[in-house]
Image: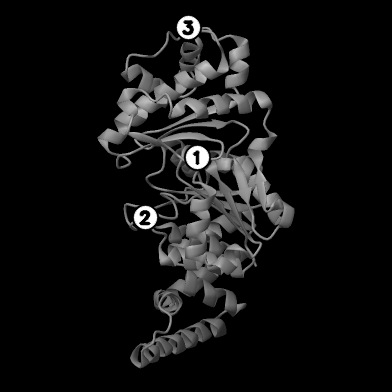
Amino acid sequence: MERYDLLYRLYGNFDADAVREAQDFVDLLPPLDSAVALSHWQEVDDELSEKKDRIRRGFPNGDRYAELAARATRDQAFTALDLFTKYGRAVNALVLDVDETLRSAGRTDNEIPREVLHLLTEFHETDVPIVICTGQTLENVKGFAIQGLGNELVHSGDVSIVYEAGTGVFTPGHRSNTKRLLYETLDDSVQSVFASVRGRVIRDLPEGLRGCVHLQGNEFNVTLKPNFETGSDDAARVIDDSLVYMLDLLGEAVTDDADGPTWTRAYYAARDPEIEGVLADRDERPDPDTTVPDAVVETLDRVTVAYYQADAAELSAVDLNKAAGVEAALDVLGVDDPFVLVMGDSKSDLDVMRWAASGDRGIAAAPDHSSPGVLDHVRQTDSLVFDRGDAASMLRTAYALNLLVD
């Protein structure tokens, strides 16, 4: 109980909020080209040093508790201590989704908040590798990563990008391992299925989808996105239509039999309630007793069909997912015994969360608007749910955990 008692004393006897606010001011509002602004910044920095010194003098291992006050709220610090009590380990890598996790159009104009970017640099300076794990293309992710984190950090050798939901891994500074195309390891039969679907998906678009969707520029996954605002009624309609269209394309790619599309619909409807719901709403759900031939099942077992309401319809390989990409990234980064913080909001992120949980490889956190499966998993593990647009709160908690372990 000693650590709990020390935290109670830290947040009860010292003005930790003032310390944290001063630290944020110093970190996020650096000196400007103004004598007045520079003078004010220096005053705050001096006051911060004095406040931290008072905490250092009041605690054994005072540096730790001064940094805790400067980096975490009372609730974040106690959550971190609960995690330390449960796991006894520091986070040794961050695994972070981008869209709707690090950034959120709902609160931050779809830009990663400055506070989040600064916290990532703080983790980097304590030798914690960063794995950006996203469904976006490599070029898109490299662009915002370099713009937000800086070219030096991105090319430091401690940052890896798992892109297109696990089809590739990019880790600058690692020579022959800098870029690994994981889809090249797939069987020819699986690659041929994706080649067929990808070759036809835009060329054979039905009239009702032309001009309404676009193919996301992935190297391997086949993802249709709406040409309407994500979450809108129009986006919901065209993504539902796109899901059925892609199921049928997949059925035709897997077998020459005319029943291929029916078998594909039946296979995925039986395995995903959301897909079943889309088909049922359209009165296109196959008979539940439909028998899918073993040879077709064997191939479909290797293909994931993902439905994101009013956002995307996607085909990907079972063997290529974010979890596989994260494992490859950690291998390149040299993280042999991972205990990661996974942050994400979608079904593809759930694969990584389950991977982490299954081998005591880390903890999972998610924004409160995440998909139901993600929220269920996070609440059943450590209940690390944060508000939309507030990824910084979870990063602060993880930073506090590491301070407590060191």
Nearer the viewer's eye, disc 1 or disc 2?
Answer: 2
**Residue 374 x, y percent position in the rendering:** 47, 40
Separation of residues labelled 1 and 2 (CA atoms): 26 Å
**Where's the N terminus, which quadrant?**
bottom right
Which of discs 2 and 3 lies nearer the camera? The answer is 2
Label 2 with label 3: CB-CB less than 8 Å: no
Q: Which circle's residue, 3 or 1, is located before the other in the chain?
A: 3
* Vertical comparison of 376 with 154: above or below: above
x then y, percent, for residue 158: 64, 61
The residue under label 3 is 289
Q: Which residue is mark 2?
A: 110
Q: Residues within 10 Å of mark 3 (few under 14, many from 20)?
A: few
Ranked by sequence position, the earlier of labels 2 and 3 is: 2
- Where is residue 376? Give x, y as percent: 46, 38
Tags 3 and 1 touching, CB below 8 Å: no
Judging by the rendered image, the residue that carries numbered circle 1 is: 377
Q: Amino acid at mark 2?
A: Asn
The residue most toward the left is 233
Point out the tag, 1 or 2, that comes first from the N-terminus. 2
Q: In this image, 81 relative to 393: left or right?
A: right
Q: How is the image coloured?
A: one colour
> Residue at (35%, 25%) from the top-left corner?
241
Amino acid identity at mark 3: Asp
* Cα–Cα gap, marks 3 and 1: 31 Å
Quarter of image, res 230: top left
Label 3 sits on a secondary structure element that is loop
Mark 1: amino acid? His
Per the image, label 1 sits on a secondary structure element best described as helix
